[in-house]
Amino acid sequence: MAGSYTQLPQDEPGPANSSPSPLDKARQWWDNATHANESAPLLDRKRMTLEPPKRSQAKVILLVVGAILIALILGGGLVYWLDEADPEPVEHVLTATEKLFLDLPSNDSIREYLKAYTSEAHLAGTESDKRQAEWTKEKLIELGIEDTRIDTYHILLNYPVERRLALVSGPEEFRYEAELREDVVDEDETSKNPDVVPTFHGYSKNGSVTGPVVYANYGRLEDFQYLVDQGVNLTGTIALVRYGGSFRGLKVRAAEVYGCAGALVYSDPIDDGPLNKEGYPFTNPPEAYPEGPWRSPSSVQRGSVEYLSLIAGDPTTPGWASTKDAPRIKPEDSPGLAKIPSLPLSYRDALPLLKATQGRGVRGEHDWAGGSKEVDYYSGPTEGDVELVNIVDYKITPIWDVIGVIKGTKEPEKAIVLGNHRDAWVYGAVDPSSGSASLLELAASFGKLLKTGWRPSRTIVLASWDAEEYGLVGSVEWVEDHKEWLSKEGLAYINVDVAVSGPHFGAEASPSLNKLLYEVTSNVVDPRTNRTVYEGWAEHTNRTIAPSTKPYIGQLGSGSDFVPFLDHLGIASISMDFNGDYGVYHSNYDSFHWMEKFGDPGFYTHQTMVRIWGLLTLRLADSPIIPLHPGDYADALSEYVTRLDAYASSSKSKGLFPVLTKAIHKLSKVANRFEKNLVRLEAKVQGFESLADLPSRLAKHVAKANERLTYFERGLLDPEGIKDRTWFKHVVYAPGLWTGYSSQVFPAIADALDAGDKALVKHTEQRAALSINNARKSLKA
C-alpha cells in the first residue's frame, strides 16, 4: 500500500543548458542505429517522383522487435488497467479456528449462567451487585481468561427512600392513592418480593410537589407545544406522559422546560402492553404476563432520567473519570440532572389520573390517544391536586467494572473491546443478563480455543460494565480513565446489551463494519430455523422496515455502552441483539421464568448470538487485513447529507450544504481507490490465516493498511464537540437532542438548524467538512 496515493510530479520546463537526459541519449542512439546507412530521398528524373530511402536491415529488425514490444506492453497495460478498474473482491473462507469456534458455544451453559445472574436483584452499587462482579471475575478466570481484574469507580447514585402519589383534592370520586408496586405472579418465584427494588427513577430530583395533572401524550416538545398553543396553562402542573417516542429523561426535561413542577411517566397498554400484538412479527400470545409476554396493568418500567443527550456517565465528573478522589461539580450545577421530581407509573396507577382529566381540556389528533377504552385521553388539567413525593438518597458509592484481557501476539497494540453491562433494575433476565450470560459463554469458548494453542493476533478485551442503567456510567468512566490508551489502540467495540428478547436479529453499526456483519451472519445458522441468520434478518427488515437487497443496519444513537467508544473517541462500533415480544422491560417480571417461557425457551438464540459475537471478534482479531470498509462509510455519508438537506428544507433554514457535500465527494473518491487497493492486498494475503504467517514485505504493506483503517473513524471527531453538549465529539453521530435513544446524523448542524442560528449552521458545516477531510487524509497518510 505504500505510496498508493502519491501524486505524480507535474511536467516542468528544464533549464536551458541542462545535460542530456537518459531519454535523449536513447533517442540519439536510435537515430544513429537506424539512419547510419540510409541516404536521403532520391529524385526519379524519368518519372519526376521522390523515391523513399532504402531501409537498412538493422532498422527493419529493430522496427519489428519494437512493434512486438509495444504490442506486449500495450496488451499488458490493458490487462493491468482492467484489473485496476474492477478488481474482484476476495470472498472470506472460514479459517480452521473459526470453524472450530462455531461448534463450541453451549446453550445449556448459557442457561446456567442466566440462572445465576437472575438469582437476585442486582441494582448498581449494591452489595448484590458487588457479589455478582466478584463472581463474574472468578468465572472469567476459571473459563481461561486469566488476566482478569475489577476496576472500581466512585460515582454519584441515588436510591429510593419514600414515594407517594395521591390525588388529594377535588371531587371525591376521583381521589385515590397509587400503589406504586407490582403484583405477585404465583408461577414466577422472583416476583414474590415486589419491593426488592422499589419503583423509582435513577438520577431523579429529590423532593415533593403538589399540583394539578395534565396529560401530555409522549412528552415530546411538540406535545407540550400543542397544549400551549391550545391555551393549556402548564405552569406548576404535574405532567402525565407515556413511555415511547423519546427517552424518559428527555420527557422530564421537556416538562421542566415548559414550566411543569413534576413528571409522571407511565406504560400505556398500546405501547408494550398486549394491544395490537397479533400477526407478524409477533410470535407469542397477545396477552399480558404471565399468560403472554406483554406488560400487565401493575407492571412498572423503572429507568434513569439523566439527560443522556447532554452528557453521559457520572453527572458530577463530566469529561473525566470518577476515581475515588476525583474533583466533582455540584449536582445542582450538572446539565444532566433533572430539576423537577418524577416517578414511573403502571397503567393501573395512571388510569385514575386519566379519568380525572376526562372531558377537561383538549384532545390531540394522530398519535395522541393511548390504547385504553375507558378514557378519551383529554389533556386536563385535573380539577383536584396531586401530591408527588420522591424522596431519594444521593451518595457517592463504588461500582465495579470487570475487565478480562487476551493479549494479542502480532499486533497487540490494537484492541477489540467486547462489552455488556451487568447491573439491572431488578433481576434483568433480558436486560442485561441475557448479554451477561452470553459474554461468559463467549469467554468459555475463547478459553477452549486458548487450550488448543490459539492466540489472537490482536488484543481482545472482555468488559462487564456496571451502572449502565443509571446513564452508561461504568463504561463512560472506564473510557475516560483509559482515554489515551483507547485513542491510540482501540480498533473496534462490539456491544451486546440485550442479547435475546426474541427471535429477530437486528444491529446498528458504524458503516465501515456493515460488510463484516453481513459476512458473519451469512456464516451462522439459526438452529431454530435452519436458515442463516442473514436470511432471517433480511426477511424481517424487508417486512417491518422497507424492502431492500440487504438487511437494514441502523445508526447508533444512545442508550447503551457503545456511546463513549463511538461518540467520544471515534472507535468503530457495533450494537446488536435478537429482539421480539418484550413487554417486561425494567420490571420485576424481567425474570428467568419469563425468558424460559417466552423469550428463548431452549436458549438456542443465545447460543446463536455467541456464535455471531465470537465470529465477529475472530475476524477483527485475526484477519491479516482488518475487515473495515471506509467505502461503505463514504456511501452512508452521501445518504446522510441528502437527508440533512431534506431536514433543512423542512425547517426555517434553506437546504444544500456545498462545503460538506464537496468534502464527502472527495472522501468517496479516495475511499473507493483505497477499497480497490484493499481488494488487491486481500488477494495477496489469501491463504494466510493470520498475520504471523505473512512474509515480511507483505506484512509491512498490511500493517500500513491496518493503521489507516484503525484511525479512519478518529478523523470524524471534532475536538470542539457539539455546542452545549461538548462531550459528544463525533461529527456524524450523536443521540438526538430531544429523542435520546435514536441517532441524529450530523448532530451539530441539526442542532444549529433547530435553533435557527444561520451563523452556527455555517460554522458547524465547516467543522464537519474539516473532520471528513481529516478522515480522508488518514487513508492517504
Image (tube, rainbow, N blue to C red):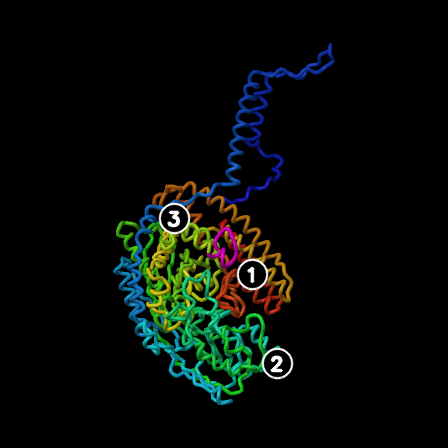
Callout 2, which amino acid?
A: Gly
Amino acid identity at mark 3: Ser
Residue that mark 3 sits on: 623
In front here: 12 or 629?
A: 629
* SS class, disc 2: loop
Q: Which mark is residue 655?
A: none
Amino acid found under the numbered disc labelled 1: Arg
Q: Which residues are magenta?
A: 540-551
Horizontal and vertical percent position of residue 491: 41, 55
Q: Which residue matches tag 2?
A: 231
First in residue order: circle 2 vs circle 1: 2
Percent across and percent down for residue 17 are: 61, 34
Left or right, 773 with respect to 98, comes to right
Which one is in front, 661 or 440?
440
| Eye-nearest disc, 3 or 1 | 3
- In what element is the residue under mark 3? loop
